Amino acid sequence: MSALAACLTLGLVPAHAAPGETTVGGDLLTGKGKIVSLGVGSDPLPAVRAKTWVVANADTGEILAAKGPHVLRAPASTLKTLTALTLMPQLDPTTPIKAKKRAVNTYGSKVGLVRGRTYSANDLFYALLLPSANDAAMALAQGAGGLKSTLNQMNQVADSLGAFDTVAKNPSGLDSPGQVSSAYDLATIGRSALDLPYLREVVGSKKYKFPNKKKSKTVYTQNRMLLGNFTGTIGLKTGYTTNAGRTFIGVAKRKGTTYIVSLMGIKEASADAAEKLLSWAFANGGTVTPVGVLGQNTLPAQSSASISQGAATADPIVVRGFAADQTKTATAGSGLDGLAIGWMLLFSAIIGFTLYGIRSAFTQRKNRGRLTKKGKISLEG
């Protein structure tokens, strides 16, 4: 029995899909329901109290099971994973960054930056990812060329990974109109973040001595899966705001296999929900049929400067899930002279830029329309 037939038999595949459209990550990844293809001997999915989630093999990207993987929701501080993934490759840990007024006055969870004081990027990354400090997020964005530039880069990085549900409006994840992501995107972004050894080191830490006014103070991770010593835990990121509720990205490795889980709108302890899905994955990863695949797990080979300038890459342009390779190649003996090849490449590039612009505009309009209700901001982490 095929994966699709099995899922239909279980009644877990939503009945509708937009005509003529392909869902990013696989045709099964639609709707709000649970999606799984159990094999012989597979355990049923655990009861998890969350609006949406994805559990996947972080090594291969294969999605074992999901619930509403592309449903748009506010990401809360799990968005800081994208902030770190964007800025770590371009900021040396020793880079000095001065705390400015806007960073110091950022609301919500803070590490307590002092205006005018200089901190290392390393200090700020630990503050960003352990106690989930919003002031550190703003300081890093300002230190990396400014808030606007950082947000442009974050959205470009998300697009380059195939995380098209994600729209970043700030670097902290605080509720903001139009700022959205999905369980699919958070798992994709988290999987890519694992490629950065520095990030793995930070999110795998339980505490860090952060410089204070007179002496350092110890800050702690909010990841209770890590604090609770769940076997094989690597890290990743917690989140909470009034609008988003609890959000979470968790990763663990056992016997050479790494699994990642992302959850949004969690109605129980985040670590408990994540551990149930990860335990199920370790026990059943070899018997279930994958129902989809996460986006690519590596960033395009390009410099930080080219990202900030919005330079085009040679990666395929994806529009609403359709891969349209805009590059054309000519081999020796093809009969095309250099001028003809040049015109073909120019024409292809124009098409690529046009499709990319249309896709970006359409996605942002759609996402803004999906989150029109403003929730009261609360402390988050």
Image (cartoon, rainbow, N blue to C red):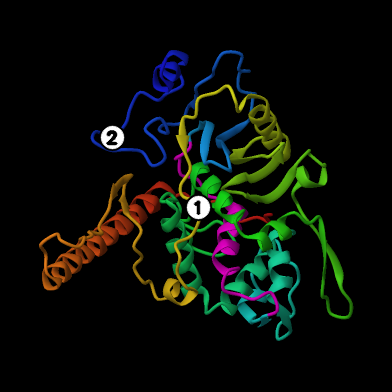
Q: How many marks?
A: 2
Q: Earlier in the sequence, mark 2 or mark 1?
A: 2
Quadrant of res 152: bottom left
Amino acid residing under circle 2: Ala
Q: Using the image, tell me which numbered label, if any, was put on residue 18.
A: 2
Q: Residue at x 60, y 28 (%)?
A: 285
Q: Amino acid at mark 1?
A: Lys
x, y percent for residue 18: 28, 34
Residue displayed at 70% across by 86% down = 116
Does residue 269 appear anywhere in the picture?
A: no
Bounds of the magenta span? 69-94
- The image shows residue 193 at horizontal and vertical percentages of 59, 55
Q: Which structural element holds mark 1?
A: loop
User: Residue 354 location, x and y as percent?
Assistant: 23, 62
Q: Bin the neighbour count of mark 2 within 10 Å (Cα to Cα): few under 14, some 14-19, many 20 and up.
A: few
Residue at image mark 1: 374
Tell me whether circle 2 and circle 1 mark residues in contact (CB < 8 Å). Answer: no
Quadrant of image for the N terminus: top left
- What residue is drawn where x is 72% and y is 60%? 202
Q: In screen coordinates, is 191 left or right of 235?
A: left
